[in-house]
Amino acid sequence: MSAPVITVETKQNLLQKLVVRRPEGGLSLNGKIRVPGDKSISHRALMLGALAEGETRIEGLLLGEDPRSTAKCFQAMGAEVSDLNTELVKVKGIGLGNLLEPLDVLDAGNSGTTLRLMLGILASHEGRFFSVTGDNSLRSRPMSRVVKPLQQMGAQIWGRDHNSKAPLAVCGQNLKPIHYHSPIASAQVKSCILLAGLSVEGKTTVTEPALSRDHSERMLQAFGAKLDIDAQTHSVSVNGPVQLYGQTVVVPGDISSAAFWLVAGAIVSDSELLIENVGVNPTRTGVLEALEMMGADITRENEREVAGEPVADLRVRSSKLKGCTIEGDIIPRLIDEIPVLAVAAVFAEGTTVIKDAAELRVKESDRITVMANQLNSMGARINELADGMEITGGTSLTGAELDSFTDHRIAMSLAIAALNASGSTTINRAEAASVSYPDFFDTLKAII
Ligand code: S3P
């Protein structure tokens, strides 16, 4: 009998290592996949549910570690959240401005979205004290991008490294409205300020240099907030104070998780995958545009709208890819998919240049350095740029011993690269995938 393609090594029942052995004759991927719920929408549904009056019902919530961190933080402040391991999660909100002072430090785990969005909510809870922290990765990530605008609104926040790193302490204040011109296109920054503005008397506006994902705007409006949106200048305003009312949220599949299968289906020969129920909000579909630019055979089927978010099934077939340049305003619309796009570029003919993506250096890991080093150790030719990568495609990869650097998207991107590498590849600390995609390795086994 030939050795299995995928072997998962566990220690005390916990996944530690993934081994991918490519059979001599190659492999192909086939089947239907349902990806887990969108991470960004899952966080927002839990947060707005906690701040709303009445009950919020969430279908399709992502059961990854990140939304679990959000749920725990808001439970510690008085919101009632039903068992997360069920198809329908119910949140009993306690109304805007009513969060209780938690008895202990709030732990956002690995989740930048939890910490940054929550800071806006906490800063405006007048007279209450909160302390917040996260894991090793999160404690090294910059928080000044949200602390500074919140301070302009009158927030009192203290922390390490000139109040820029967690652990942070927040003493809630009666904030004042501002018009913030963000130097970066970041949905976390935009959402943090809008959430702070919900309970502020007057008009709070955020202008960003390019449009970032707009899930907060869509969901805030669905929960009853009136927003002014100026698409031309990428500005959003909220006129506070606002009342939010519990809603039903249907979370579509996460396009950032679908991206692994889109790339896998395109680069592995004789493959065809149908990825069902994927959110295709235009502020998130940069990955589809980039792969199409590279010549990937991807079709959108069954396009529909579900609870205010566009959804489609995505079919991908093996494709002959060519290099391209990815830069400018598309970057915020595919920022989380760049690690796996780098894998696609390795198997494309010609050179791919990714620019304007310095943000990758402050994600869960430095995704430029980590992806370049890991793929180069398999035989890829990637030059790091200060704000991206230059990837010379068309090389063949050889299996190697790799590391996720505890970054979920790195773990999964490397697993996709390993499918097309000769011999055997080991990915250490592969358990990181469970932050956004707990079933990733089971799905991988199922389609081989
Ligand atoms: C997110 C926004 C993005 C993205 C992150 C999730 C969100 O970060 O990279 O994974 O849910 O708002 P930035 O806002 O820092 O660009």
Image (cartoon, rainbow, N blue to C red):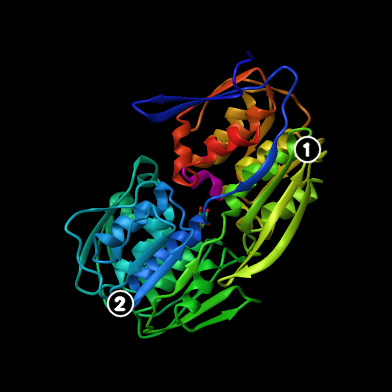
Considering the numbered disc 1 on the image, is that residue within a helix, a strand or a loop?
Answer: strand
Amino acid at circle 2 = Gly
Task: Report the side of 342 relative to 393 (left or right).
Answer: left
**Where is mark 2, residue-wise?**
95
At 57% from the left and 79% from the top, the residue drawn is 229
Indicate which label's residue lies in the foreground, 2 or 1: 2
The image shows residue 128, relative to residue 418, as above or below, that is below
Helix, strand or loop status at disc 2: loop
Q: Nearer the viewer, residue 236 or 5?
A: 5
**Residue 333 horizontal/vertical position (percent):** 63, 58
Q: Which residue lies most toward the left here?
A: 103
Q: Is residue 106 left or right of residue 307?
A: left
Near-viewer residue (312 or 161) = 312
Label drawn at residue 260: none
Q: Are marks 2 and 1 in contact (CB under 8 Å)?
A: no
Q: Quadrant of residue 277?
A: bottom right
Q: Amino acid at mark 1?
A: Thr
Does 258 sit above or below residue 430? below
Q: Quadrant of the N terminus?
A: top right
Residue 146 belongs to the span the image colors magenta: no
Graded by Cα atoms within 10 Å as few (under 14), some (14 to 19) or many (20 or more), the crowding at tag 2 reads some
Image mark for residue 351: 1
Could one spot residue 406 in this view of the protein? no
Which residues make up the magenta segment? 359-366
Give the percent coordinates (x, y) of residue 16: 43, 27
Q: Where residue 39 appears, x then y in whole percent?
A: 49, 55
Q: Position of residue 48 (x, y in %)?
A: 39, 70
Residue at image position (46%, 72%) is: 248
Residue 10 found in image quarter: top left
